[in-house]
Image: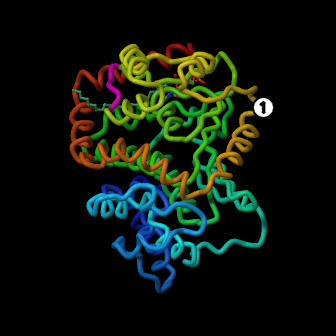
């Protein structure tokens, strides 16, 4: 039976021992958290208590690098917040986490793959790198089912302590992702829009705040939500094919990029370039995207994956905790803005998308896409 919602999957997975997806809660927002591992441990009956984020854990100097304390000393509010968000833990807690038994028992092979209908995950255990290939034909639109399956695959990787990095790519060269599935935003009811938007928020928060290194291997066009997906990564390698485009083109559909789409873009290409790009709904060629910093590197199509892997190996040479702390320091304020007003953002989306005028615009856009083919 097709699983239609994140909640349905959560219920189903409750008994399967996977880390739970907790949409709507801060702890679900960010990566391989202590909470996530604790939950995973409990799922397997492993007796282990989540470390408390008290003073005692700001303890002795980490033998492999600076302590949390020496990077910056957060306030107690920050600590609670960081702990709940799970973005990072002080060294002592990290070390305890390292000793936590993984609930995923891998066979002794160096590669491991799992896939569901719309997401293929190939884990190279010798490198500690997973590749996620999106396969939602025809255009990898981010349907609710895809988002749900993606979230489950992501959670598995977050809970696998051997996985240090993820490469995001498409199973279909030519299209990385067509963005949010317009059919999910057309002609449905408020409950459906709510469920859909929660899943969109959830995926963005998880990817944007992941402690793993995330590299996008953009092997095709990547409009709107597809561009956002790429923007969550730490580094973007794109195929150098002038037929491909990338950008947040929401205004061309008569809709508005939400503030956190905008923030992610501003953090990447700056305010002025974002202002123009967002108002005009600009879709950039790879060369233009490189020029404004929307992508980091262009390579021939057949080198996208190998380049992403070699960039990954560079990133993985950096001491993990230092890189993670730095990533968190850079990104947390942006993620927090959404976390603080998640419900309001859902309400805004549902109200906005339910408007007759917006529904009309989306229908016309879909019609134009179809007519383009004829
Ligand atoms: C006061 C202010 C308040 C503010 C409040 C804000 C609230 C929030 C507002 C809402 C925010 C929403 C944010 C939205 C983000 C999005 O991502 S919207 C989606 C945008 N995507 C696009 O514009 C891409 C459209 N598609 C394409 O350009 C092309 O399809 C392609 C990806 C370049 C591929 O081209 P090609 O290979 O030629 O394939 P096509 O023939 O065009 O398409 C094949 C079929 O797929 C259908 N399709 C394409 N894209 C989508 C999609 N995104 N969703 C659903 N379906 C899609 C297309 O119609 C074809 O269908 P068939 O004709 O039936 O085969």
> As displayed, is residue 53 above or below residue 157?
below
342 horizontally vs 66: left or right: left
Task: Assess disc 1: are there few (<14), some (14-19) or many (≥20) residues with their C-alpha within 10 Å of its C-alpha.
Answer: few
> As displayed, is residue 369 above or below residue 350?
above
Q: Viewer-proximal residue, 136 or 219?
A: 219
88 horizontally vs 336: left or right: right
Q: Which residues are magenta?
A: 254-258
SS majority, magenta: loop
**Where does the image place residue 194, in percent across and percent down from the top left?**
29, 45
**Where does the image place residue 46, in percent across and percent down from the top left?**
50, 84
Q: Residue at x 59, y 17 (%)?
A: 285
**Where does the image place residue 291, in percent across and percent down from the top left?**
58, 18
Kindly identify which residue carries mark 1. 302
Residue 145 in view (yes/no): no
Residue 109 in view (yes/no): yes
267 horizontally vs 336: left or right: right
């Amino acid at each position: 039976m097709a699983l239609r919602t994140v909640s349905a999957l959560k219920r189903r997975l409750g008994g399967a021992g996977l880390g739970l997806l907790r949409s709507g809660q801060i702890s679900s927002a960010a990566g391989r958290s202590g909470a996530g591992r604790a939950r995973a441990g409990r799922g397997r009956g492993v007796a282990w208590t989540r470390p408390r984020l008290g003073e005692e854990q700001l303890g002795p100097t980490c033998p492999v690098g600076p302590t949390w304390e020496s990077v910056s000393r957060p306030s107690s509010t920050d600590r609670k917040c960081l702990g709940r968000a799970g973005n990072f833990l002080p060294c002592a807690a990290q070390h305890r986490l390292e000793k936590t038994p993984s609930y995923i028992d891998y066979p002794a092979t160096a590669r491991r793959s799992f896939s569901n209908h719309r997401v293929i995950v190939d884990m190279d255990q010798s490198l500690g790198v997973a590749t996620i290939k999106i396969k939602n034909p025809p255009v990898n639109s981010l349907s609710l089912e895809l988002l749900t399956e993606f979230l489950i695959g992501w959670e598995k990787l977050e809970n696998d302590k051997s996985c240090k990095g993820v490469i995001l790519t498409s199973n279909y060269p030519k299209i990385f992702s067509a963005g949010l599935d317009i059919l999910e935003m057309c002609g449905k009811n408020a409950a459906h829009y709510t469920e859909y938007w929660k899943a969109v928020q959830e995926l963005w928060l998880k990817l944007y705040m992941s402690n793993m290194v995330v590299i996008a291997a953009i092997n095709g066009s990547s409009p709107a939500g597809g561009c956002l997906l790429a923007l969550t990564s730490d580094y973007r390698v794109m195929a150098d094919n002038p037929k491909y485009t990338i950008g947040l083109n929401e205004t061309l559909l008569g809709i508005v990029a939400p503030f956190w789409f905008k923030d992610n873009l501003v953090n990447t290409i700056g305010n002025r370039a974002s202002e123009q790009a967002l108002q005009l709904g600009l879709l950039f060629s790879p060369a233009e995207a490189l020029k404004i910093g929307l992508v980091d590197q262009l390579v021939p199509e057949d080198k996208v994956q190998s380049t992403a892997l070699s960039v990954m190996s560079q990133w993985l040479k950096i001491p993990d905790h230092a890189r993670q702390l730095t990533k968190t320091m850079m990104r947390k304020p942006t993620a927090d803005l959404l976390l603080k007003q998640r419900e309001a953002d859902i309400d805004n989306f549902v109200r906005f998308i339910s408007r007759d005028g917006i529904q009309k615009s989306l229908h016309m856009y879909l019609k134009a896409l179809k007519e383009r083919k004829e």
